[in-house]
Amino acid sequence: ADKKSADVLRARDFDTAFDFAFVDLVLGWVTGRLATESLAKHLAKREAAIAALRVPPIHFLDTHDTEPFLSRARRDKSALKLAATLQFDVSGIPLVNYGNEVGRTGGRWPTNRGDMPWGAAQDKRLLEFYKRLIYARRFDQNLRHAKSTISALSRDLLMVLRGETIILINRGRRREVAKVAVAN
């Protein structure tokens, strides 16, 4: 391509892009390596960047080119559920790679492109969890269109506010109680 055509292609010419940093932030938080306050700050910066886009970015927990999230999280399905909850509840377009919803494991190349588990090899409870996330996002317009405001409420408790929808995500083992001030 000549210089003129190379100069014309800019970010504003794309409908959207992939947010590659999302998965590392989420993995860090759900495994306890990233403080809740740090995650909230990173996601607030992300939200500010998203506000300038016509279409929010696509975020994922893994792709066909990366190690499966469940493998990176040491096969901890609780960590996957927390990560998926964040994925579906913050601004952006969640992309579910095949098999996350049924507990597909794998590792680094070439097992990251392993077969889809079928039948008894699928985790049906995890599939039901994903179905509930999808249902909530489909029917709650706030989860698809409202701006995200993210706050750290404690060491382990994160709040995502989307319009009038409040999501509390606790990565800790103890029950937490939160008082949240809301308008109206």
Image (cartoon, grey):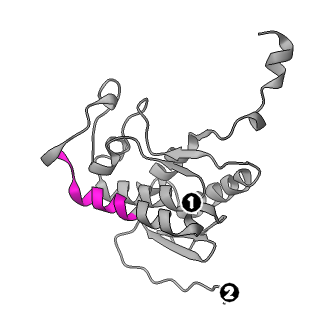
Q: Where 94 falls versus 179 (above or below)? A: above
> What is the three-letter code of the residue carrying label 1?
Val
The residue labelled by disc 2 is 183
- SS for dot 1: loop
Q: Residue at x 56, y 39 (%)?
A: 20
Q: Does the magenta stretch include residue 128?
A: yes
Location of residue 173 (image quadrant): bottom left
Q: Quadrant of the N terminus?
A: top right
Q: Judge left or right: residue 25 versus residue 131.
A: right
Q: Judge left or right: residue 139 versus residue 50.
A: left
Q: Earlier in the sequence, mark 1 or mark 2?
A: 1
| Residue furthest to the top | 2
Q: Which residue is drawn at 24% across and 60% down?
A: 125
Task: Pinpoint residue 159: horizontal percent, then vertical percent.
Answer: 55, 71
Q: In which quarter of the image is the C terminus?
A: bottom right
Q: Which residue is drawn at 33% across and 29% down?
A: 113
Magenta: main secondary structure: helix
Task: Pinpoint residue 124: horizontal percent, then vertical percent.
Answer: 22, 56
The magenta span reads: 121-132
Task: Pinpoint residue 88: horizontal percent, then vertical percent.
Answer: 49, 58
Location of residue 84 (image quadrant): bottom left
The residue labelled by disc 1 is 90
For disc 1, the neighbor class at 10 Å (few under 14, some 14 to 19, many from 20) is many
> What is the three-letter code of the residue carrying label 2?
Ala
Q: Which residue is drawn at 42% across and 80% down?
A: 176
